Image (cartoon, grey):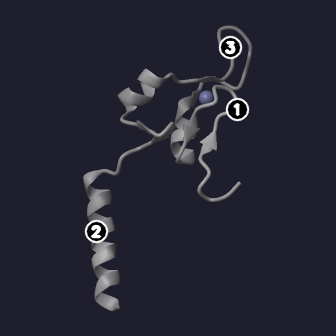
Amino acid sequence: MSIKDPYCCSSCGAKFSSLVLFDWHRTGDYTNEHPHYGRSCRNNQQLLNHGAENIDGVWKMPMTESQAASLEALKARRNAKF
Ligand SMILES: [Zn+2]
């Protein structure tokens, strides 16, 4: 597995760019006893409602405005150095 490979769910087959989002899509209890019936996957609509987007078959979370701003700040600092 290279660093560019997405996290692939062995249960539903969905691919994720981040482990955090992958973990979020797995839900439910680690037990199979009533009234809990084990782990399951959230569906595409739930992922969309969560704010995730599917780009080329891979689910990812778009950057927030503050994340985008700090990325721009880092780029500016890097460009100023060289
Ligand atoms: Zn899944």
Q: Are marks 1 and 2 in contact (CB under 8 Å)?
A: no
Q: Secondary structure at mark 1?
A: loop
Label 2 to label 3: alpha-carbon separation: 45 Å
Q: Is residue 65 left or right of residue 36?
A: left
Tell which of 24 and 35 is nearer to you: 24
Q: Which residue is mark 1?
A: 10
Q: Which residue is mark 3?
A: 37
Q: Where is ligand 1, by quadrant?
A: top right
Name the residue type under label 3. Answer: Tyr
Instruction: Find the distance from the CA under tag 1 to the CA under tag 2.
Output: 36 Å
Q: At x 68% / y 14%, what residue is drawn?
A: 37
Q: Tell me if mark 2 has few (under 14), some (14-19) or many (20+) residues whose alpha carbon lies within 10 angstroms of its own.
A: few
The residue to which callout 2 is attached is: 72
Query: Which one is nearer the viewer's eye here, 34 or 9?
Result: 9
Up-down: is 53 above or below 65? Answer: above
Q: Position of residue 70 (x, y in %)?
A: 30, 66
Secondary structure of the residue carrying numbered label 2: helix
When the figure is inspected, residue 75 is found, relative to residue 21, above or below; the finding is below
